[in-house]
Each structure stands twice: as structure tokens, then as C-alpha cells.
């Protein structure tokens, strides 16, 4: 897990949200599973767990990709879009899920092409 001191060191740079990314958390529905099954034209499972799920959709280079996301992931992304510094967005996510691996979260989001650049605030 990334240390908070490492995040503080980079907290002056806040990732910029990609306009072609969207996410939603559905607390009471398996929305991602239902959407993916329909999108990929898969067979509906006989026993579908009716639990909350989130979805992240990204359009990059004319191609749409998708992945499941947690409530914590969505909270972190919402905080970034609200303009919070990376450290504060991470703190909010850690409040919801103290076991969150911030390094893993950032790696997944950067790999998914959610962030396009860092906006560096002048000192």
C-alpha cells in the first residue's frame, strides 16, 4: 500500500479526468454484470447474485472498454473530478475502505486510461 507520505509528496499534482470516462456505483443491483452480459451477448447465469456493483466505461482512441469498479473506486474518482488533490482523494477512499491498496487503485486507473495528464499547481 502506498504510504500517505508518498502521496503527500505528489499531492501538488492532481490527475486530470478523461472526458470520455464515466463510472457509476449501483448499491443494490448487479448493474455491471447485467450490462456486460448484454454487451458481450453472453448467456444470463441461472443464479445471479443480486449485490451492488459499479461500472467504469472508457472511450479511448475510438474504442470503448469497461471494467468492474468498487464503491471505493467510484468515491476516489468522484473526489478527483471534484478537484481534490490526490492525497485528499486517497484519504476519502481510505475512510471508506481502510484496507484499500492505493498503489493498485492508481495502477488500475492509469492502465485503464482514465487519467490523461497531471495538472501541476504552481507553488
Image (cartoon, helix red, strand yellow):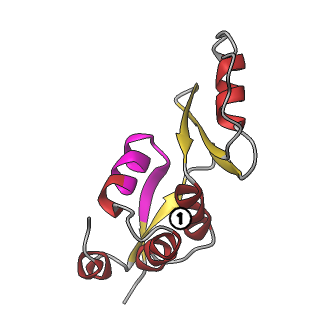
Q: In the rendered image, which quarter is residue 121 located in?
A: bottom left
Please, what secondary structure does the residue beneath circle 1 have?
Answer: helix
Residue position marked by numbered label 1 in the rendering: 76
Mark 1 is surrounded, within 10 Å at the Cα level, by few (under 14), some (14 to 19) or many (20 or more) other residues, namely many
Residue at 70% in and 15% down: 44
Q: Is residue 61 left or right of residue 42?
A: left
Give the image location of residue 69, x and y in percent.
54, 46
Looking at the image, residue 62 lies above or below residue 99: above
18 lies left or right of 26: left
Residue at 43% x, 49% y is: 109
Apparent side of residue 74 relative to residue 15 in the rendered image (left or right): right
What is the span of residues highlighted in magenta in the rendered image?
Answer: 105-118
Residue drawn at point x = 26 percent, y = 68 percent = 2
Q: Which residue is more in the foreground, 35 or 84? A: 35
In this orientation, which residue lies closer to the viewer: 98 or 107?
Answer: 98
Residue under the image location 50 percent in, 47 percent down: 114
Amino acid at each position: 500500500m502506498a504510504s500517505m507520505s508518498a502521496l503527500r509528496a505528489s499531492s501538488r499534482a492532481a490527475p486530470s479526468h478523461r472526458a470520455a470516462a464515466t463510472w457509476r456505483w449501483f448499491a443494490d443491483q448487479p448493474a455491471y454484470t447485467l450490462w456486460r452480459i448484454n454487451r458481450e451477448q453472453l448467456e444470463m447465469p441461472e443464479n445471479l447474485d443480486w449485490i451492488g456493483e459499479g461500472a467504469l466505461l472508457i472511450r479511448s482512441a475510438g474504442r470503448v472498454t469497461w471494467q468492474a469498479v468498487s464503491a471505493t473506486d467510484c468515491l476516489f474518482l468522484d473526489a478527483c473530478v471534484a478537484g481534490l488533490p490526490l492525497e485528499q482523494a486517497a484519504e476519502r477512499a481510505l475512510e471508506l475502505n481502510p484496507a484499500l491498496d492505493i498503489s493498485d487503485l492508481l495502477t488500475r486507473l492509469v492502465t485503464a486510461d482514465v487519467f490523461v495528464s497531471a495538472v501541476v499547481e504552481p507553488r
